[in-house]
Amino acid sequence: EAEPEGLDPTRYAFSGSGHFVASAVMEPLATLDENSEPVPYLAESIEANEDSTVWTITIPDAVTFHDDTALTADVVVQNLEAYRESYITKAGMVSIETIEAIDDTTVVVTLAEPFVSFDAALATQFGGYIIAPAMLEDPALVNAPIGTGPYVFESHIANESWTFTANPDYRREDRPYLDSIEFRPIVDNVARQESLE
């Protein structure tokens, strides 16, 4: 129903349309299961200490971004730090004291106070989507996103379409289901319905 302003979750607040398009190319650390409970998605595990003030995020081995950059704990730290500095998400991250990569696949987030639903927050734009370091460095890539998701960015025509092709190296063997996917923003409700029909 709308054109996403840009597909960098640290620079743009995603509308529903933004989430639809972003989820084709980038993945969150967590997602919600059929009971709306948070479960790891891009992360292998997300575990809290007894009082939910220290959270340990384990990153899978051998996952790469679409530009062949490796997904590492350091990259996740860079993303989470970018969310901490973002005017969109920083208000929700004020309780974070430190974010550290303790090895190549482990990130430890220490909070100033208990945050029992921190893992659920990692299923949202609040620190959830992990993007390639190149996107963190180059604001121009908001319209050419680089993630680890099932589809790879191919093209974008403003207010017309976003096109993605299947990621041949996707970590889930049974996905993606389609060879390509195209999103067409059509603002007018009647025109959108007629286009669908």
Image (cartoon, rainbow, N blue to C red):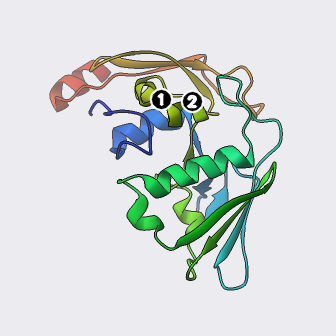
Left/right placement of residue 142 relative to residue 82 reads left
Q: Image quarter for residue 151?
A: top right
State the residue at coordinates (72%, 29%).
170
Residue type at the position of mark 2: Ala
In the picture, the disc for residue 138 is 1
State the residue at coordinates (24%, 25%).
186
Q: Mark 1–mark 2 contact, CB under 8 Å? A: yes
Q: Quick one: which residue is furthest to the bottom in this view?
A: 51
Expressed as whole percent of the image width and height from the top left, the position of residue 44 reads: 76, 53
Question: Which quadrant of the rendered structure holds the C terminus?
Answer: top left
Q: Distance from label 1 to label 2 (Cα)?
A: 6 Å
Expressed as whole percent of the image width and height from the top left, the position of residue 112 reads: 56, 79
State the residue at coordinates (48%, 53%).
83
For disc 2, the marked residue is 134
**Placement of 135 over or under 106, stated as above or below:** above
**Placement of 117 over or under 20, stated as above or below:** below
Question: Which quadrant of the rendered structure holds the N terminus?
Answer: top left
Circle 1 residues within 10 Å: few <14, some 14–19, many ≥20: few
In the picture, the disc for residue 17 is none
Q: Image quarter for residue 61?
A: top right
Circle 2 residues within 10 Å: few <14, some 14–19, many ≥20: some
Residue type at the position of mark 1: Asp
